[in-house]
Image: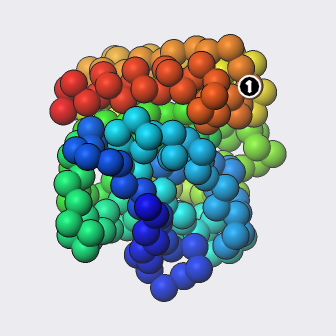
Amino acid sequence: MVERFAYGDGAMQYGLFRFADGSPRGTVILIHGGFWRGTPDYFDGPTPMAEALVARGWNAWQIEYRQLPNGGGWPATLDDTAAGIEHLAVVASSLHVDLGPIITVGHSAGGHLAVWALSRPGAVLALAGAVSLAGVLNLLLGEKENIGNGAVVGFLGGSSTDHPERYGAADPIMRIESGLPVRIVHGSRDDVVPMNQSDTYVAAARDAGQDATVTVVDGDHGAVIDPLHPAFAELQVALGEILAKA
């Protein structure tokens, strides 16, 4: 069963909640990618992954959020991510659902948002950790390497020279939450988000005392959200490791 909830008045401010049967293992908050760009009907998932996780005992809360050029970017995309996460408490109360431990999981730009959410300002809902699926975790490096044809600069409305405070507020590698684990799954043949996005984050995270690991799977950028790909088994391992620490 799927229930839709709005957390704001905008066309892109909503989420879909899927129930696990019986006693859930916990709740996964799924955040899609797209380099922070999209339209109100862009919501591409990862729906198959949500359905596969529900079949394996997880509740799934898929959140949509404002993206460029439809009201997103700085700071709306971050504000919506935080609001969508916090609205899960309202969803649980409305549906009388036991959420269990809550873990964010995001792909590509959604991976950025999933890890960033661990340090989101004004957090109320507790998170157990995050899983990045080929996420953009080093915005300064992404700016330097022009990933997504200027996606980072577009998302933050300018360069790091022009807006250093925005990069500081939005970049996961500058906002490491040492007390919360991060797991990363990244395809070895990813030509959209380079592997160095994951590698540099893990190096910095470990230096900061965070429990962070990266698992490399054979595949491209989309393989890590395919529930029929071996990457899905690695996602389940990652969720289990975070769950064990919750």
Q: Position of residue 185 (x, y in %)?
A: 53, 24
Q: Is residue 14 left or right of residue 41?
A: left
Q: Position of residue 163 (x, y in %)?
A: 56, 56
**Among the 4 quarters of the image, the one containing residue 116:** top left
Which residue type does callout 1 highlight? Asp
Q: Is residue 157 left or right of residue 4?
A: right
Residue at horizontal 50 percent and vertical 21 percent from the top: 233
Q: Is residue 219 above or below residue 166?
A: above
**Among the 4 quarters of the image, the one containing residue 206:** top left
How many numbered marks have been drawn onto this rendered protein structure?
1
Residue beneath disc 1: 220
Residue at the far right in the pictured view: 149
The quadrant of the rendering that contains the C terminus is top left
Q: Is residue 19 above or below residue 88?
A: above
Q: Position of residue 102 (x, y in %)?
A: 28, 45
Residue at horizontal 46 percent and vertical 63 percent from the top: 2
Residue closer to the observer: 40 or 211:
40
Residue at the far bottom in the pictured view: 9
